[in-house]
Amino acid sequence: MFRRLIILFSVILIALSVTISGCASQAAQAPAVPSENSQPVTRPTLTLPTNSSIHVAPVPETTGEASNGPLAYTGKLVFVSGTNDVGGPQLYTSTANGNNWLKLTSNTKGGEWFPKWSPDGTKIAFYSDMTGNNQIYVINADGSNQVQLTNDKFNDSLPAWSPDGAKIAITSDRDSVEQIYVMNADGSSQVRLTNNSSDDAAPSWSPDGKKIAFQSDREGNPKIYVMDADGFNQTKLSSTLFTDDYPAWSPDGSKIVFQSSELGHFEIYTMKADGGGRTRITGGNIDNKYPAWSPDGTKIVFYSKRDCTNDNGEIYIMNADGTGQTRITYSDCTDAGLASWH
């Protein structure tokens, strides 16, 4: 019996020895735990939002593609946005790519419309009904020093600078119908240029300052006319049965861009300065309106409702022949167009 206990005890000792030896071997073969510095920890990089306090809505990146290549528009735009704002539409500037929005006006009554850069780019003329009826105002390019130029009980609208910046042509209904007036850039010396019983409106100076294009409904629907800068020699340029209006003279004086209802809605057309060569440069089944030239005359900025389900729209740019149409504002369809390019 005693001998059996000795044998059993020996077997247990041998088993314990084998187990301890195996564990020691596994510990020796286990990989070393890496030190904190041997394997640098990779952490995700967080992209922080940029400060967009001067932006009223998301704007497109400058990597959009037009048919003629990447967006490379130069200069600045002034335009109307915020049609649904309680205070009414306000004026903004941006780069020609549609970036870097800056709000110029914060008027709490009425709205601001049809801004136009002065030839030197230091001021912007526009009209507003903030006093109850439309009047002409001018503001510095940074939004400072807003000055009212006309002050009467009628509606004065659609300002247009002369090429030298010394005068502003306007539309006024002070004679019971809309007529075209011209005044000094400070609002003084207002002189009537057109004088008939129909509406004459939307003046646009030729680059040499010698002529003014405008629209008139003296023969029914509005048509495009031209006159000398003193109001003489008024001549009709367009002769369709439809509405042709809002002319804008090209920087080289060779063409006039305008909008027409020829297709049952508004599209943009160009014609030669003498009225020939009428060419439609936009298409579709929804309004494209309010064209204005780039400073070099190679492109046109305009307003379109093509991407909007409401009655407002966004701002687009295209080449002067209508190619490369590219949307540049993305503001929930509250940009009313009416852009001016400097």
Image (tube, rainbow, N blue to C red):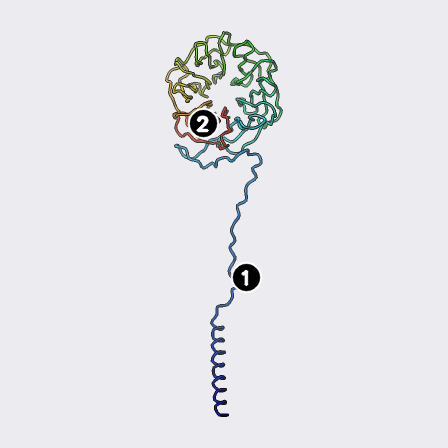
**Residue at the spot 56% in from the left edge and 11% down from the top edge:** 174
- SS assignment at label 1: loop
Left/right of residue 253 with respect to residue 143 in the rendered view: left
| Whole-percent x, y for residue 130 in the image | 60, 21
Regarding residue 29, the answer to whether it shows in the image is: yes
Residue 39: percent from the left, percent from the top? 51, 60
Classed neighbour count for the residue bearing mark 1: other residues with Cα under 10 Å, few (<14), some (14–19), many (≥20)? few
Residue at position x 44%, y 34% from top? 71
Query: What distance separates the C-alpha of mark 1 from that of mark 2?
Result: 60 Å
Report which quarter residue 153 is drawn in: top right
Q: Nearer the viewer, mark 1 or mark 2?
A: 2
Image position, residue 43 (x, y; %): 52, 53
- Determine whether 175 is above or below 257 in the image: above
Q: Residue at x 48, y 78 (%)?
A: 19
Q: Amino acid at mark 2?
A: Lys
Is disc 2 surrounded by few (<14), some (14 to 19) or many (20+) residues within 10 Å?
A: many
> For residue 81, which numbered disc appears in the image?
none
| Residue placed under numbered mark 2 in the picture | 305
Q: Residue furthest front?
A: 1
Q: Which label number is shown at residue 36?
A: 1
Q: Amino acid at mark 1?
A: Glu
Q: Which of the pair 330/191 is nearer the observer?
A: 330
Q: Nearer the viewer, residue 298 or 83?
A: 83
- Tag 2 secondary structure: loop
Q: Marks 2 and 1: in contact by CB < 8 Å? A: no
Q: Among all residues in the image, which is located at the extreme bottom? A: 2
322 sits left or right of 83 in the view? left
Of callouts 1 and 2, the N-terminal one: 1
